[in-house]
Amino acid sequence: MTGDLLIQNATMVLPDRVVVGDLRVISGSIQTVAAGGGLVPTASETVIDGTGLHLIPGAIDP
């Protein structure tokens, strides 16, 4: 998948905790991790509903 991406409501395993929230990828790089969510999609982003899914460091491959 190419382009900008917003994954919403995913369970994210962070170095110090596990949270539910949103992850934004711009031009192939993670730009924002928002614990608790709330990120608003831009017109250029593909949005993925991450409800029930897990994002794990090293397993995130935008």
Image (cartoon, grey):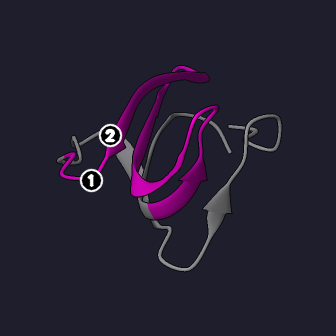
Residue furthest toward the front? Answer: 16
What kind of element bears circle 2? Answer: strand
Q: Residue at x 47, y 76 (%)?
A: 51
Q: Is residue 25 magenta?
A: yes
Quadrant into which the C terminus falls: top right
Camera-side residue of 20 and 44 = 20
**On the image, numbered disc 1 is attached to which residue?**
37
Q: Residue at x 32, y 38 (%)?
A: 44
Residue neighbourhood size for the residue with mark 2, other residues' Cα within 10 Å, grouped as few (<14), some (14–19), many (≥20): some
Amino acid type of the residue tagged 1 in the rendering: Gly
> Position of 30 compared to 9: left or right?
right
| Cα separation between marks 2 and 1 | 5 Å
What kind of element bears circle 1? Answer: loop
Residue 52 drawn at (x, y percent): 56, 80
> Position of 41 compared to 23: left or right?
left
Quadrant into which the N terminus falls: top right
> Position of 60 compared to 8: left or right?
right
* Highlighted magenta segment, given as a residue range: 10-39
Residue 23 drawn at (x, y percent): 44, 42
> Position of 14 compared to 26: left or right?
right
**On the image, numbered disc 2 is attached to which residue?**
34
